[in-house]
Amino acid sequence: MNVAPWPGQRLGLPEHGRGAVAGWGRRLLALTVDWFGSLMVVGAFLGTGLWSGSAESQWAPLAVFAVERWLLTSLSGGSAGQLLLRVRVVRTDGRRLDPGRALVRTVLLCLVIPPVVYNRDQRGLHDLAADSVTVRV
């Protein structure tokens, strides 16, 4: 059995430092930053209505999260949380994700299950579908 000693080796990525597969801690923290940012944006518009339980208040944070993730990943290589934590999403050949691939990745990310099903390179189903990998900068 040919098992790569570190995540990303099969993709030609280094074991440590710039360009290495980003660890789970950075990724989860970036996700948390993005989610709370989305809640703050929605809260600015809905106020305490954010917690009312209405259909708009339930789906608005996810919609803001999805738009933020899609736009910023397309334009700058990562969401606000990812950029803050020095993580980028790139194609496996190192190029930036185009808007179409970023959209596919974002939609699958918002479905929750695809990101938690991952391979030994720490690429979830959303990354496999978009031909992307999350790396350190």
Image (cartoon, grey):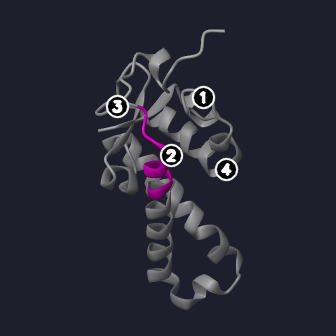
At mark 2, the secondary structure is: helix
- Camera-near label (2 vs 1) is 2
The Cα–Cα distance between marks 4 and 2, rounded to whole angstroms, is 15 Å
Image coordinates of residue 20 in percent, x first then y, are: 37, 30
Question: Rounded to the nearest whole Å, what is the CA distance between mark 2 and mark 1?
Answer: 20 Å
Q: Could you tell me the amino acid type at mark 1?
A: Ala
Which picture quadrant has residue 55? bottom right
Left or right for 25, reference 81: right
Q: Is residue 68 magenta?
A: no
C-alpha gap between disc 1 and disc 3 = 25 Å
Q: Which residues are magenta?
A: 21-29
The amino acid sitting under disc 3 is His
Q: Is the residue 112 above or below the residue 19 in the image?
A: below
Q: Are marks 4 and 3 in contact (CB under 8 Å)?
A: no
> Which residue: 48% across, 69% down?
36
Mark carried by residue 129: 1
Task: Nearest to the eye among marks 2 and 3: give it.
Answer: 3
Q: Tell me the kind of residue under disc 4.
A: Val
Mark 4 and mark 3: Cα distance apart in space: 28 Å
Residue at label 4? 112
Q: Amino acid at mark 2?
A: Trp
Residue drawn at point x = 33 percent, y = 42 percent: 75
Number of other residues with Cα within 10 Å of mark 2, as a class: few under 14, some 14 to 19, many 20 or more = few
Q: Which residue is mark 2?
A: 24
